[in-house]
Every structure is written in C-alpha cells, then in structure tokens.
Image (tube, rainbow, N blue to C red):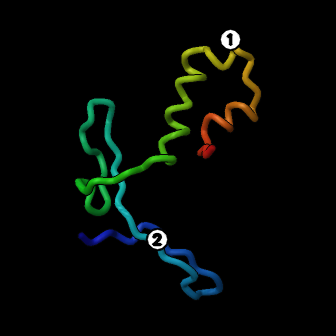
Amino acid sequence: MTYELLVEVTRNGTVESQHFGAAVVCDVHGNVVERWGPIDNLVFPRSALKPMLAIQLVESGASDHYALSDAELSLACSSHQC
C-alpha cells in the first residue's frame, strides 16, 4: 500500500515535514468526487470522528435544550479516559 503525499510543509525553501495518507470526497449519494491515495484501505478513525458525532447534539437541538456551553460541546468532541 502506497500512500500519497498530501501535504508538504516548507520553511525558507527547505522541506520541514511531509504528510502522507489517503482522502476521499463523496457527494450526498456516496459517489466518489475526488480521491487521493488508496481509499479502500481499512482505517480506524476513532477520535477523529468525535466532532462529526457531536454535530448531532447541535443539529438535534439538544445543545440548546440543555444549554450546553462551548466548553461542554468541546468535551463532547474530545477523547476521554477514566
């Protein structure tokens, strides 16, 4: 599996870091609009999805109903460990 160079950061003309990976953009029907790298590989996004899951708190009206603060919404987007 070969990942694609997605971002290259330079400073004063010198490459400081390179970031490889895969990404995909789909339309509302799930059709691939744009792709970079091997998008069919199995991934475990874990914490990267938490902000998207927390969107439901806002869209459902629950954050307004329970008067959640910005700090509480931030907590909904974060990782927790007991």
Q: Is residue 5 above or below residue 46?
A: below
* Residue drawn at point x = 62 percent, y = 16 percent: 62
Residue closer to the observer: 54 or 27? 54
Q: Is residue 5 above or below residue 39?
A: below
Query: Which x, y percent locates residue 9?
Result: 55, 75
The quadrant holding residue 31 is top left
Residue closer to the observer: 25 or 54? 54
**Furthest-top residue in view?**
65
State which quarter of the image contains the N terminus.
Answer: bottom left
- Name the N-terminal-most of marks 1 and 2: 2
* Residue drawn at point x = 39 percent, y = 71 percent: 5
Q: Which of the two discs, 1 and 2, sits closer to the camera?
A: 1
- Give the class, few, some or many, for how many residues have Cα within 10 Å of label 2's Cα (few <14, many ≥20): few
In the drawing, does residue 6 fall left or right of residue 64? left
Q: Which amino acid type is shown beneath numbered disc 2?
A: His
Query: Which x, y percent locates residue 41?
Result: 25, 57
State which quarter of the image contains the C terminus.
Answer: top right
Q: Are marks 1 and 2 in contact (CB under 8 Å)?
A: no
Q: Is residue 26 above or below residue 38?
A: above
* Residue drawn at point x = 67 percent, y = 37 percent: 75
Q: Which amino acid type is shown beneath numbered disc 1?
A: His
SS state under label 2: strand
Which residue in the structure is indicated by mark 2?
19
Mark number, residue 21: none
Which residue in the structure is indicated by mark 1?
65
